Image (cartoon, rainbow, N blue to C red):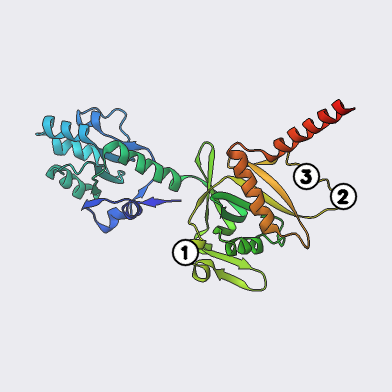
Amino acid sequence: MKVTVQDLIDKIQFNVIYSTPTALKKEVTTSEIMRPGLEMAGYFNYFTPERIQLFGMKEWSYMMDNVENNRYDLLKKVMTDVTPLVIVARSLEIPSEMIAAAKKQDIVILQSREATSRLNSILTTFLDEKLAERISVHGVLMDIFGVGVLLQGMSGIGKSETGLELIKRGHRLVADDRVEIFQRDAFTLSGEPAEILRNMIEIRGVGIIDVMNLFGAGAVRDFTDIDMAIYLENYDNDKEYDRLGNGSDEIILDNVSLPQFRIPVKTGRNVSVIIEAAVMNFRAKQMGYDATKTFEDRLTNLIEKNSEDE
């Protein structure tokens, strides 16, 4: 996924000091941010011009107090033809030499009121998410009780229909049919819809439904972290299903492990209610309460009591 300078301006509040239409279309290719402090002192051995150049109080102070005669020459070396943009934090004054260098190299200059460290964090988080490699999986992604749930199963099992029922019960759709998954950090997966399918769900026999139009803005989300997966499968009389909840399967998506629960589907089973119960039980375990352990403890106590009575 690509991120342009215009995308940054649309997402994060900046004061645009200098820009041109072509400069706004430049792409940001890395989430790494460069603070050119040593470069202002003339040391360019390990300079990375392809990064966003961020001037905080230290860089700005040195540039303004100690670099005067060759300020323009140094800024020309910092602001190269591969530099996507320059940002000055803390609403610091923009020197005329910086604007002149930006005009020469066709580079956008932005000014932010944010403190430098906070702005660095905001930029890195946004770019990490947007530039992360995406994988596409088949399924329905829902926000159920604040838990990101990926519904999967064979084609025709009823994933979208179940998603629609969950929407009617007050939960939120993130993506239907195709879920774009990316690794937000080493332990967290996030998912979002393919742009062409955003806020839409396909129901066989009905067609495409615009969920936001029919159910309101509260029925959809742009993205969510994925906390668990549920696999819907046809009920098999010969298969032994977990009845105590002693454990769940795990699946690996984009090198991140997710708990997976397999729910059998057959006539008469209210799958959406079962999914709600599975999610609430998952949340309870996350908060430290395990109904299975409680049952096993009660069973152990009952066996011990009966043994004593004998």
Q: Sequence order check: which comes first, mark 3 or mark 2?
A: 2
Q: Sequence order check: which comes first, mark 1 or mark 2?
A: 1
Residue 162 in the image: x percent, y percent?
65, 61
Q: Label 1 amino acid?
A: Ala
Residue 277 in the image: x percent, y percent?
66, 51
Q: Residue furthest front?
A: 309
Q: Residue at x 38, y 41 (%)?
A: 124
Nearest to the eye among marks 3 and 2: give it. 3
Q: Report whether residue 186 is seen.
A: yes
- Callout 2: SS: loop
Q: Residue furthest left?
A: 69
Rounded to the nearest angstrom, the CA distance separating label 1 from label 2 is 44 Å
Drawn side of residue 250 relative to residue 78, left or right: right
Q: Nearer the viewer, residue 237 or 178?
A: 237
Residue 231 in the image: x percent, y percent?
69, 51
Q: Sequence order check: which comes first, mark 3 or mark 1?
A: 1
Rounded to the nearest angstrom, the CA distance separating label 3 from label 1 is 38 Å
In this figure, which residue is indicated by the disc labeled 2? 238
In this figure, which residue is indicated by the disc labeled 3? 243
Badge 2: few (under 14), some or many (20 or more) residues near its Cα, within 10 Å?
A: few
Q: Quadrant of residue 80?
A: top left
- Callout 3: SS: loop
Mark 2 and mark 1 in contact (Cβ < 8 Å)? no
Residue 135 in the image: x percent, y percent?
56, 49
- Callout 1: SS: helix
In this figure, which residue is indicated by the disc labeled 1? 217
